[in-house]
Amino acid sequence: MRFLIAMLLVVSVAGCKSDLGGACTTNQDCKNDMVCNKSTCVYLVSLVAQGEKHCRASKDCRLVGQCSATEVCKKSGVYCDCDCAAASDADCEQSEICKISGYCTARDEKCVVNSDSDCEKADVCKNDGRCTVKDGKCVAN
């Protein structure tokens, strides 16, 4: 009888999924809407927030406006890698590529030159007279 009770306890514990902060080895060990990251169950939103923090602090953010974590974290095993992208014009406008070359508008997760206004803000206009957009670049009139 004791053996039967012990087996029932093992089976019932084995079927349980971990709560937030619980131990895990795979995503299946965690409750709904959670993933296993570094052997701990966390909400995917938490990983995206970590990705945002990483992206904002990156060299690519400062240089080319890739300051936002992409919509979906790529899940692989027990960790997530979040790619960075230019998700908004604000991401691009704070970057060096905008200030220098006019790539100030976000499109398809990259910064592009979209208008004469983008060129007019840039050093290439002020220093070299390249104030008009043509074929995605700032050029002289």
Image (tube, helix red, strand yellow):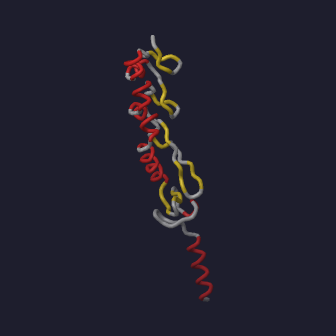
Q: Which is more toward the observer, 139 or 115?
A: 139
Q: Which is more toward the observer, 133 or 21?
A: 133
Q: Which is more toward the observer, 36 or 16?
A: 36
Q: Which is more toward the observer, 79 or 126?
A: 126
Q: Residue at x 50, y 63 (%)?
A: 40
Q: How many marks?
A: 0
Q: Position of residue 96 (x, y in %)?
A: 41, 31
Q: Residue at x 52, y 61 (%)?
A: 31
Residue that extends furthest to the bottom in the rendered view of this protein: 1
On screen, residue 113 above or below 5:
above
On screen, residue 137 above or below 85:
above
Q: Position of residue 24 (x, y in %)?
A: 54, 65
Q: Position of residue 19 (x, y in %)?
A: 48, 64
Q: Is residue 49 left or right of residue 6?
A: left
Q: Residue at x 39, y 27 (%)?
A: 99
Residue that extends furthest to the front in the rendered view of this protein: 127
**Rendered image quadrant of residue 101:** top left
Q: Residue at x 51, y 57 (%)?
A: 34
Q: If the image is split into quadrants, where does the C terminus sit?
A: top left
Q: If the image is split into quadrants, where does the N terminus sit?
A: bottom right
Q: Position of residue 76 (x, y in %)?
A: 59, 53
Residue that extends furthest to the top in the rendered view of this protein: 141
